[in-house]
Image (tube, rainbow, N blue to C red):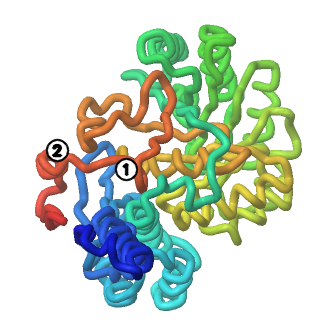
Amino acid sequence: MAPNYESLHDPNAEYTMRNLSAETMLDDSRERGGGRDVEITDVQTTMVDGNFPWTLVRVYTDAGIVGTGEAYWGAGVPELIERMKPFVVGENPLDIDRLYEHLIQKMSGEGSVEGVTVTAISGIEVALHDLAGKILDIPAYQLLGGKYRDQVRVYCDCHTEEEADPVACADEAERVVEELGYDALKFDLDVPTGHEKDRANRHLRPGQIRHKVDIVEQVTERVKDRADVAFDCHWSFSGGSAERLTDAIEEYDVWWLEDPVPPENLDVQQRVTQSTVTPVAAGENRYRVTEHRRLIEDGAVDIVAPDMPKIGGMRETRKIADVANQYYVPVAMHNVSSPVGTMASAHVGAAIPNALAVEYHSYELDWWADLVEEDVIENGYVTIPEEPGLGVTLDMDAVEAHMVDGETLFDEA
């Protein structure tokens, strides 16, 4: 609405102009998406066939603003999100905490303490952060309390054609550092060694331990101070075997040893962690702050490793980090996501003081970066965007090109 300049000669001109300015500002605010009286109208998912089946989530509103999130892959996650749609349609997307607790309560019958139900809720929660940031015209990290850092470190999960070859692992480590620019890496240690007799009993024979030590030695000695290196065991070993392994690698510069024992028994996890100076990490198979709190308070981890789009979402991961910070425990987020989930984890990493790094699991997938229009990882770091929300925009053509067979593309905004 343009002001009426004839009113400048009116004795009530100042009052009139103030009202006109307020009206204009309100109209401008609505045009920018700044109006907060917004309702959710729909929730949709599309699964992308990456090196994991990524479940992308979009939350639509009556203001025409759309938020994009991601849930960890898992059978039944899209169906659970569809089941939850009636619980959020008509609600204000800015009420993130209330909607999260609402979904936890409504989905308690489907098991919202842990598992895929929590993962499905996580996907909606991440999309709400993107949406709320767009409505309020602020980056998502501001919704978590602001940022400690402008860049978040990324650690690259590395593989070779012959996983069991220590020299091949060292060669790949050097290539990833020198050619791809990462200064943080991870390799698997639950690999065949040629000494196995019965892998089901979780017992490591002496030859198996020597082989794993050889991988650790070759990789850490090759990269030396150019990169930190972690090693993943994928919950494979007995408590006694894990203790012998952690003892055998103590002399090497191991960033952390991840998930050496199965996740169910916290007493064994605690015993292994406290038996060694080798840092031990765990957490991707624990859900919400309630389960991670026990890991941290019992001294069962040196580093906690929640998977944000799996274990409860962005705010829940922030809560985990808050507990960890009280015990001076750093956070290294497990992550097998597309660029959407990776950027969301990076926003969390920016907003917490004790962030070590966010994982990147797709360096061998040459189209990973094509899913969004913006650059996400550059030289081993994510620069946190200042654009509203997560700061990434789906490339719908790329999403459609890589959808899981039988999936339907999202509606346009």
Q: Residue at x 56, y 56 (%)?
A: 142
Rendered position, 19 above or below 29: below
Q: Residue at x 23, y 68 (%)?
A: 2
The answer to whether 226 is drawn above or below residue 354 in the figure is above
Give x and y (percent) for residue 124. 40, 70
Horizontal side of 238 relative to 59 (left or right) equals right
The N terminus: image quadrant: bottom left
The residue drawn where x is 51% and y is 11% is 174
Report the side of 350 relative to 53 (left or right): right
- The 10 Å Cα crowd at callout 1, few under 14, some 14 to 19, many 20 or more, is many
- Which amino acid type is marked by label 1? Val
* Element on which disc 1 rests: helix
Residue 12: quarter of image: bottom left
Q: Can residue 30 be seen in this view?
A: yes
Residue topped by disc 2: 398
- Which residue is identified by label 1? 340
Disc on the earlier residue, 2 or 1: 1
Kind of residue at disc 2: Ala
Q: In the drawing, does residue 52 fall left or right of residue 269?
A: left
Place of residue 21 in the rendered image (x, y in percent of width and height, measured from the top left): 38, 70
* Front-most of residues 179 and 268: 179
The reply to whether residue 93 is in sight is: no
